[in-house]
Amino acid sequence: MALKFNPITCQSQKLPSFALPPMASLRSPKFFMASTLRSGSKEVENLKKPFMPPREVHVQVTHSMPPEKIEIFKSLEDWAEKNILIHLKPVEKCWQPQDFLPDPASDGFYEEVKELRERAKEIPDDYFVVLVGDMITEEALPTYQTMLNTLDGTRDETGASLTSWAIWTRAWTAEENRHGDLLNKYLYLSGRVDMRQIEKTIQYLIGSGMDPHTENNPYLGFIYTSFQERATFISHGNTARLAKEHGDIKLAQICGNIASDEKRHETAYIKIVEKLFEIDPDGTVLAFADMMRKKITMPAEFVYDGRDDNLFDHFSAVAQRLGVYTAKDYIDIVEFLVDRWKVKELTGLSADGRKAQDYVCGLPPRIRRLEERAQERAKQGPSIPFSWIFDREVKL
């Protein structure tokens, strides 16, 4: 499964209201592209600089969870084994990317590729922009495993730890890894996209990391992943729907199977937070309110292709226009989680806990009203080139 949702500031180009403002100011002046000068030349020596990511986060909070709460997660080891690991599938029962792609060992391989490319010709460019963005987000998986392993009390301390939390993180990563593999190979075979620009974008994104504002705190971390898995379930489900509308049933199957995985993972993360509400309702509702105030950021917030400083905003605007992932979806997810975790029914909270409860429960209708007003004021967006599709222009 990073963008900030801001229902008040909808851009005039009809960017979705949950898109980040332009981030050109975050470009690192220390980052240089590889030089074509000879390696032994004086000019090369002068140009050599330490690598710096093109997106930099300068203010970060770490280890915000009180140390004594680590014991809560240690005490949940057995519970996680029985209630969370069951949402993982045995490898032998999992689909694999090759199940949906032309078989390179088959005599009919070239014909199958030709058929795939013929189907892809009927799909519009704006769909491919969104599909590429989804694929790039999936391909940044190393960042997400890193993020989970920052969480105090649940991280994989050795790289092969046998705690339930560590087993979940590794196996979740292994299941998710199939998503980027499958979409990447499909896009490569389609002939519709500039794979080198896409590959550069993936490298930039993984090098930049992500900043989900989870502060090494598993309360915040699992609220974030609950939201994110539902968001990716919605996004892949909508790309499946659109692929079917464009007549590509096999691509619809690809996106639909990925969406199914995301739904299963969402169920697991939601159950973890549900358990935290049972054990520590005050601490959990405070964490929920904290994440909502900071806004949930999308994992690909720092996406960059070497050209477009506002690439995430532009990609998000296309996704909004096509109905793949929208501001309304963001609000619906908040509302879903409030209901699913029965936040309105919590009792015995502290004064701060009650304030957090009121804030979270009142949030969906409040931001829904603001979003409706913002959409009424939004203007039609321009068309801009996307390097992912050979600089063809797509309407925002």
Image (spheres, rainbow, N blue to C red):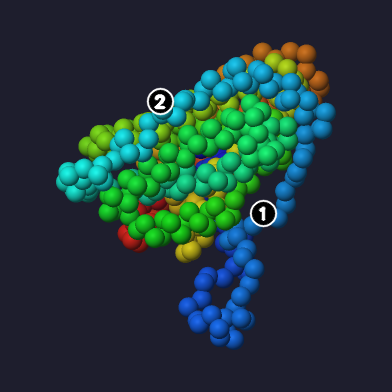
Whether residue 6 can be seen here: no
The residue where tag 2 is placed is 93
Q: Earlier in the sequence, mark 2 or mark 1?
A: 1
**With 368 as the anchor, is 68 left or right in this view?**
right
Q: Quadrant of residue 220?
A: top right
Mark 2 element type: helix
The residue where tag 1 is placed is 57
Residue at 68 percent across and 39 percent down: it is 158
Please determine whether, in this image, residue 262 is positioned above or below residue 391.
above
Residue at 41 percent across and 60 percent down: it is 197
Q: Amino acid at mark 1?
A: Val
Frontmost residue, 108 versus 105: 105
Frontmost residue, 194 versus 42: 42
**Disc number for residue 309:** none
**Residue 380 percent across, percent down from the top left:** 40, 49
Q: Residues within 10 Å of mark 1 (few under 14, many from 20)?
A: few
Q: Nearer the viewer, mark 2 or mark 1?
A: 2
